[in-house]
Amino acid sequence: METSPSPKKKQVLLPIVAGTEPIEASIPIDILRRAGADVTVASAGDALLVEIMYGVKIMADELLADCAAASYDLIVLPGGVPGAVNLGGSATLESIVRKHAEKGGLYAAICAAPPLALASWGLLNGHKATGHPWFVEKFPPEVTAVDTNVVVDGNAVTGTGPATSMEFALALVEQLYGKEKVEQIAKPMLVRYECGYSMKEVNSVEWHCSGTPKVLLPLANGIEEMEAIILVDALRRAKADVVVASIEDGVEITARYGTRIVADVILGEAADRALFDLIIVPGGMPGAKTLGGCEQLVALLKKQAEANRPYGAIGAATAHVLEPRGLLKVRADRATKHSNPLTAR
């Protein structure tokens, strides 16, 4: 009996460049790969290693110049400044997106990229579109600016910024795969908001640090890329000194959905420093389990606890790092974790 061939994977191109916004790149990469898409992260520069905003280092899959002959189902442009300007100034990228659009292909951009890239190429003329509020005035008269998080108009999808990157990414999944796939992905990620649900503070204490806060963020292969990159992005925006440390043999980490993150240091180098003001552990499987088995990291966390300094974890890391090491006595009113950490997505 002949078996029917597997359906061809949707092909997605996501270019990055110096100055790309980390959240706006990492969330679409993660979400689209969860949906089953083959996402090519392409460097619009001369090297595969790209330092994007806030010192986040990403290893691209390909150089953009090598992607010109390929066909894609979707091209997604992340924002950021000067990232969106750099993408908009790339003749290679403009040519790729223009040919794709002329064939009726789906294309998308978020934050500053709708006005500074797509609109600058004339690819939003006659469309309704949105973008970051700081940049919507850059739309030409041919584009109708709409004050909403995400706009889908024909084959063009636009979004406003980092905080709406999840909504933007799920809209792309819906365009490629339909609403059922969106629901399938959103549920295990706990994408929902209810008043009083998102945050609850118990045993309130004041956190103190002298000078610039020093934060340690350890990484292992298989960690959840969104959880790691959002933490780095937000804390560095707040001017914290964030040290991204690999517990692996080298600084390059391959996250759960294939994003290749380059850490600042190996954990051993960070461990020699003075106490941190905060240690925060990202989740994702199998990364959280690997982090929980790292004796050097556990020793740092215990030292942090003994000094009565803050530490924390997200997702599966609560169950696989803090709880089994006696760093968290889980009670219903004192801690939270992914509802199914053994299979956390």
Image: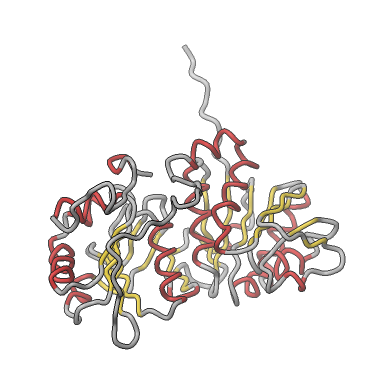
- Residue 96: x %, y % from top left: 68, 59
| Left or right of 331 in this view: 86 | right
Give me the residue at 42% from left, 41% from top: 188
Rendering coords of residue 307 (x, y %): 15, 74
Q: Closest to the observer: 47 or 237?
A: 237
Give the answer, above or below, for where 227 lies relative to 53: above
Query: How was the colour assigned to the protein in this rendering?
Result: secondary structure
Please name the residue shown 45% across and 70% down the image.
234
Q: Which of 223 and 277 is in front in this view?
A: 277
**Residue that lies at the very extreme toward the top in this rendered image:** 1
Residue 65, by quadrant, is: bottom right
Q: Position of residue 94 (x, y in %)?
A: 71, 64
Q: Is residue 53 above or below residue 342?
A: below
Q: Nearer the viewer, residue 127 or 236?
A: 236
Q: Is residue 180 left or right of residue 253?
A: right
Quarter of the image where the C terminus is located: top left
Which residue, as the protein is rendered here, is positioned at the far bottom? 211
Residue 191 x/y as whole percent: 49, 47
* Residue at the far front in the pictured view: 203
Residue depicted at x 31% and y 51% = 336
Residue 306 in the figure: left or right of residue 124: left
Total numbered circles: 0
Which quadrant of the view contains residue 211? bottom left
Q: Nearer the viewer, residue 99 or 195?
A: 195
